[in-house]
Amino acid sequence: MYVPNYVPDPIEIPGNVTEEDYETRLAFVKRVAVLHFASLLVVGAVAYGPYAPPQDASWWLLGITLVALAIIRVSLRKGRTEAKVSSLLLAPLLVVVGFVLHHAQTDGRPIWTMSIGPGCALIYALLCGRDYSFVGQYLLSLIASSTAIAALAVAAPASVSDARFALIANGVYLSYYVYDLASLLARRRLREELAAVVDLYRDVLNIFGYIVRCIGHWRKHRIWLNPR
């Protein structure tokens, strides 16, 4: 007797990174971590640069870019073309993310602190050797980055509002980053590291697609929903 799960199974592609040996998987994670942190430096350069479109236009550009990337992934998922196209769109994606954060930093928000968590996560990935763990990466990076942000807030000194923003933004982003980094291993193959970095930005839209998949799954298996 087949008993379906209450939620749909995660999407996996043939030949994904999880099918490789441990050393290969670990090397892939480290490369993605390095490239992701490098992408944050590009975003920061744009955010602290002298120009950005108006705030509303920046948000529209970001929304259109993320939706376009989501459509590309869904329509081209079965082949390797999607990874190549997504990689080519990484640069404009980073620019529009920087535009949005430009307005946050001009409003006085310490957005640079959002790089501390991923920076600690990168240090962990590079120094852990074979003892890599996503749970360990998250917990140790969260402790180290939160401590660093708190120390900087005291030394600066920063306002209570800015310190609260920095700590919350760091915790939320680090939680999302480590979870998505673990999840995308089943959706990426070797030599798709740049596309994986795109996923780390694009996957903020996954919640909407996941809701649609859940509803379809519930209807198919008559879970929760009224069969009539």
Image: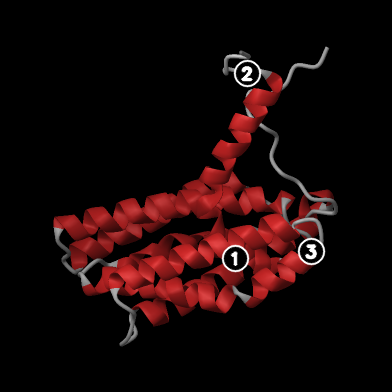
Task: Decide if residue 31 is in sight here.
Answer: no
Q: Nearer the viewer, residue 14 or 193?
A: 14
Residue at the extreme front: 228
Quarter of the image that includes the C terminus: top right
| Crowd around label 1: few <14 · some 14–19 · many ≥20 (10 Å) | many
Q: Secondary structure at mark 2?
A: loop
Q: Residue at x 43, y 54 (%)?
A: 173
| Crowd around label 2: few <14 · some 14–19 · many ≥20 (10 Å) | some
Q: Nearer the viewer, residue 163 or 217?
A: 217
Q: Amino acid at mark 1?
A: Val
Which dot, 3 or 1, sits closer to the camera? 1
Which dot, 3 or 2, sits closer to the camera? 2
Residue 190: image tag: 3
Residue that label 1 marks: 198
User: x and y percent of residue 208 in the render?
Assistant: 52, 44
Q: Secondary structure at mark 1?
A: helix
Residue that label 2 marks: 223
Distance of label 3 from label 2 (alpha carbons):
36 Å
- Is 74 placed left or right of 139 in the picture? right
Q: Nearer the viewer, residue 145 or 67?
A: 67
Point out the tag, 3 or 2, that comes first from the N-terminus.
3
User: x and y percent of residue 202 in the render?
Assistant: 55, 59
